[in-house]
Amino acid sequence: METAPKPGRDVPPKKNRLQAKKKKPRRYWEEETTLTAAGAFPGPSGNKKRNRELRHQRPKNTNFPKKSRISRKPQLPKKSRELRNPEPQRSLSGAQDPFPGPAPVPVEVAQKFCRIDKSKELPHSKSKTRRRLEVAEAEEQETSTKAALSQLLLVEEPGFLEGEDGEDTAKIRQADIVEAVDIASAAKHFDLNLRQFGPYRLNYSRTGRHLAFGGRRGHVATLDWVTKRLMCEINVMEAVRDIRFLHSEALLAVAQNRWLHIYDNQGIELHCIRRCDRVTRLEFLPFHFLLVTASETGFLTYLDVSVGKIVAALNARAGRLDVMTENPYNAVIHLGHSNGTVSLWSPAMKEPLAKILCHRGGVRAVAVDSTGTYMATSGLDHQLKIFDLRGTFQPLNARTLPQGAGHLAFSQRGLLAAGMGDVVNIWAGQGKASPPSMEQPYLTHRLSGHVHGLHFCPFEDVLGVGHTGGITSMLVPGAAEPNFDGLESNPYRSQKQRQEWEVKALLEKIPAELICLDPRALAEVDVISLEQEKKERIERLGYDPEAKAPFQPKPKQKGRSSTASLVKRKRKVMDEEHRDKVRQSLEQQAQKQEKKAEPTRARPSALDRFLR
Amino acid sequence: MKVKMLSRNPDNYVRETKLDLQIVPRNYDPTLHPFEVPREYVRALNATKLERVFAKPFLASLDGHRDGVNCLAKHPKSLATVLSGACDGEVRIWNLTKRKCIRTIQAHEGFVRGICTRFCGTSFFTVGDDKTVKQWKMDGPGYGEEEEPLHTILGKTVYTGIDHHWKEAVFATCGQQVDIWDEQRTSPVCSMTWGLDSISSVKFNPIETFLLGSCASDRNIVLYDMRQATPLKKVILDMRTNTICWNPMEAFIFTAANEDYNLYTFDMRALDTPVMVHMDHVSAVLDVDYSPTGKEFVSASFDKSIRIFPLDKSRSREVYHTKRMQHVICVKWTSDSKYIMCGSDEMNIRLWKANASEKLGVLTSREKAANDYNQKLKEKFQHHPQIKRIARHRHLPKSIYSQIQEQRIMKEARRRKEVNRLKHSKPGSVSIVSEKKKHVVAVVK
C-alpha cells in the first residue's frame, strides 16, 4: 500500500528499470515473502524504502551549485550535497529534519571570503600541476563557504540611526541621541574643556580602549576613555604637532616642535629621536612596527620601533609635508602636496609608487578607508573628492563644500567624517563596501572651537574630535565594526593577553620591504622571473628540455605497419601541425592589420598613402 | 528617530573568575585581518628557521659488535626488536627502547651475509660465508640449553643474501643462483639462473608475494615469478646494482641502489626507462629501504652518509652523517615510519629520526595543531627563495662537500662536450639522450 507511486513521480528510477529488463527467475515463495514483509510492517519501514529509492533520482526542485571551472572531477563534498534528498529525511523515530541539507550561504558573504580571482583562467600547465591547482582551488572554495557560515555565530549587530519618514538625520542633535540611547552609550559622549592649551590632536589605540591627546601648547595626556581613568598627564613644554600610540597603549609617540619623543603610559620619556626632527605628522603601521614621520624638511622617515632603526628616509622633494595618512589595507603612505597631488610611498622605493593629481589647489587632507578601496581628499579648492584606489585611481564622487574640509577620517564601516571650521559633517554610504554618498550628510555637529584632529574610535560608535576648545567625543551610530576578533585586537583583553599578543605580533613582524600596492602579490606566481629562468636554462643546456618531441608513429599490428604507412602517418601529423601554425600566424597578421588600420581611420592624413 | 548604538555588555567578553578560560571571540572578516599573505609568509619563514634549529636527528648508537655490521633485519611484530649480523659471524638482537643488546649468537664462521625474519616473528634465518643457511628461534634458549639453530642447511656454494616470503613458509637465497626453499626441506624447491654471475641480493615483493627481484654483479636486475621455473625479465644498467627494494605500497615499483652513485626507481612494467633517477650520493650506494608509507626511501652509501629521498624527487630531502660514522653498509626504515637504523663499518648501529625536527613523545592538541599549521605554511611558501634557501641548507662534511663540487665540474664538462657535439654535427644525427634513458643499457625478456 505504501509503495504506490505518487502522481508526480511516476517515472521509475533508472535502477528499477534495469531490474525490470533483466528479471531474475524467482520462486513463488520468495515473491510472497517480500510482499508480506512489506505489508506486515507498514509505516516507517515502507517509507524508508521509498526514500532510498528516491534518493537515486535527481531532485527536480533543487538548484545545483554553479558549475565550477573544475570540470573533470566533481569534488566529494559537492557530490554528497547533490545527492542529498530534498525531502526531509526520516529517522528511525520518525522525526523529521526541518532544515535538511547544508545551511545556505549567501553569495555576497561567500564572495567576501573568497581569495581567488575566479575571472582569471588557470594557467596552461602540466597535468600534475594542474590537478594540484584544482585541488587547491576546491579547498579554497570550501574554506570560504565555511568562513561565510561562521558569520552566523557573530553576536553583535551594528548600530544605526534612522529618521522617521521625511526626517533628516543630519538635523538630529547629539543631545537627542544621548537622550535616546542607553546609559552606557550616553556615557560615551563627553566634552573635555581644555581651552588653555590650544587645538588638540588625538589618537585612539588599536583596541579602541585608550585615548591620547596632545595640545599645541604642550599638554599631553592619555586616558582609558571608557572608564575615564587618567593614565598620565604631562606638559612637554614644547609645541605638540601630532600624537600617536605605538603598537600597544603602553607606548606613545609625540611629535614635538624639534624632535620626536616616545613616552610610556606613565608619562616617562623613553626616547628622544633626534634623527626625526621638525615632524608634522605621525603614522604607525602596526603590522610592520614602523613609525612613519613626515617632516617640515620634506623627508618621509620610517622608524622601526621594534629595533629602533631607521629603515628608510625618503625625500619627497615636495617641500613641507603636513598631510599624511596610511592605507590600512596595504600599508602604503599617502602624502598630500601643495601642488594638488597625492603621492603613494613605500619604504622599499626611493620614488613614489604613484602620483595622483587630485585638486587644483593644494591638498588639505587625505583619508583612506579600511578596505583600501576608497580615498577621500579635500583641497584648497574647497572640493571633497572620493577616489577609487583599485587600478585606475579615478574620482568616483566630488562635491564642493562651502568652506572646504581641513580634516578627514574614515570609520571602520566606511563612514566619512570631515571637519570644516567648527563643524563636523559625517557622510554614510549604502553598505560597508560602498563609497559614502555625498548628497546628504548623515550627521552634523557644531563644536565650540575649530577642528584640529579627527579620529574614529575602533570598535565603538564614537568619533573623537580635537579642537581649539578641547576634546569632544561624538556619538555616531553605525560607525564601528561590531564584532572584533579576540586574537587581533581585543578591547577587553587582560594584561596577560596583551603581553602574549605582543610577543606573537613581534614574531610576525612583516619586513618593511614587503610593502607594495598589492599585498597579495607575494602569493602569486612570478611569471617574469620564471620565464627568464627558463630562457637561461635553455641557453645553458643548448636545447629546450621541455620541447615537444617530434611525432613518432607507434608500430601497429603485424602486417599493418609497413614503412610507407608509417611515413604516411608521420606526414599527416606534420601537415596538421604545419596547418595549425599557418592558421595562427594568419590570425595574428589580421589582428595586427586591424590595429594598424584603426588609428589611420581616426585621423586621416595626407601621408597615409605612403603607409604599407 | 530610531537609534541604536553599539553597546557591548562586558560580562560577555571578560571571564568571571580567574579559574575560567579567557573569552576570545572570533570574527574571520578579512578586513579585520589585513596583510594575510605577508603575515603568513613571515610565519612560514619563522617555521622554517625553527625547523632547522630543532633538526637534531641522531638518537642513539648501539655498540657491541666486534666487527662491521653487515646486515640488519626488522622484527615483523615488535617495533622495539632489531636483528643485526656482523662481519665476524655474530648475530645480535637489540631492544631499541632500552637501547641494549638482549641476545648474542655466534651464528657463522666468516661474514653473516644475510639475515631475515619469518613473517610470524617466531624465528629468523641467517646465511653466512660458511655456505650454510641457519634458522634460529627468536626467543633465547631456556636455562641450561645450548644456543643452537633450529635447522641448518649445508649448501654447495656461498650464499650472499636471503629473504623470506611475506605470507608462506618459503624463503629465497641467492649466490650463484636464486634458490627458492620450502622451510621443511633441505634442498631448494627450484633454482633459477640467468647468466653466470654471482647474485648479491634477492627480495620478495611484499604485495604480489610470488614476485622476486634480484641483482647480480654482471650489472643486471632480474625479476622472477615464483610460480614458474624461469626468470621473467631483466634490465642491464651501466654499473652494478648492489641491492633493490620493493615499494611496500605500489606493487610494481622498486628502487635499485647502484654503484654509479645513483638510485633508480623502476616501474616493473616498463623497465626501459626508470621512473626517476635519484642522485645526490658521492660514492657507491650500498643499501636502500622504503618507508612503510611508500612515499620515501632511505639509502646508505659508501660516502659515510645516509640520505632520504622522496619517491618522486631526484634530489634527497635529508642527509645524515656524523664524524664517527664510517661507510654505511645497511639501512632500515622502522615499521612505524618514524625512525631509521643504519649499520656501518665501525661496528655501530645508529638510530635516527626519519623527520629530523620532529618532537618525540606525546604532543598536546595545541602543539599538534600548531605543527600542522606550520607544515601547511611551509608547503605553501616553499618556493620562495628565502625559505627555499633555509629549508635546503645542510651542513656537509668536508669530504662530501668537496666531492660534490668536483663531480659538478665533471658533469658540467660532460654536458658541455655533448652540447658542442650537437652543435657541430649534422642536424638530426646526434640526439640528446635524457638522464633517465642514459643509464639503461638493455632490457631482456
Image: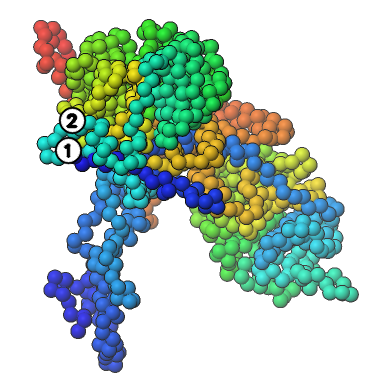
Amino acid residing under circle 1: Gly
The residue shown at (59%, 57%) is B292
Q: Where the C terminus of chain A falls, by quadrant?
A: top left
Residue A177 in view:
yes
Between discs 2 and 1, the one toward the N terminus: 1
Does residue B230 lie above or below A211 as drawn?
below
| Numbered disc 2: secondary structure | helix
Amino acid residing under circle 2: Lys
Does residue B291 lie above or below B230 as drawn?
above
The answer to which of A560 and B297 lies nearer the viewer is B297
Position of residue B172 measured from the top left corner of the image (x, y, whole percent): 67, 65
- Cβ atoms under marks 2 and 1 closer than 8 Å: yes
Specify the label residue A171 is tagged with.
2
Spatial separation of the CA atoms under disc 2 and disc 1: 9 Å
Q: Where the N terminus of chain A falls, by quadrant?
A: bottom left
Q: Residue furthest bottom?
A: A29
Specify the label residue A247 is tagged with.
none
Specify the label residue A163 is tagged with.
1
Q: How many marks?
A: 2
| Numbered disc 1: secondary structure | loop
The answer to which of B362 and B173 lies nearer the viewer is B362
The answer to which of B123 and A416 lies nearer the viewer is A416
The residue shown at (71%, 71%) is B122
Q: Is residue A500 left or right of residue A89?
A: right
The residue shown at (14%, 70%) is A8
Chain where mark 2 sits: A
Does residue A64 lie above or below B75 as drawn?
above
Category of crowding for the residue at label 2, using alpha-carbon neighbours closer than 10 angstroms: few (below 14), some (14–19), many (at least 20): some
Chain where mark 1 sits: A
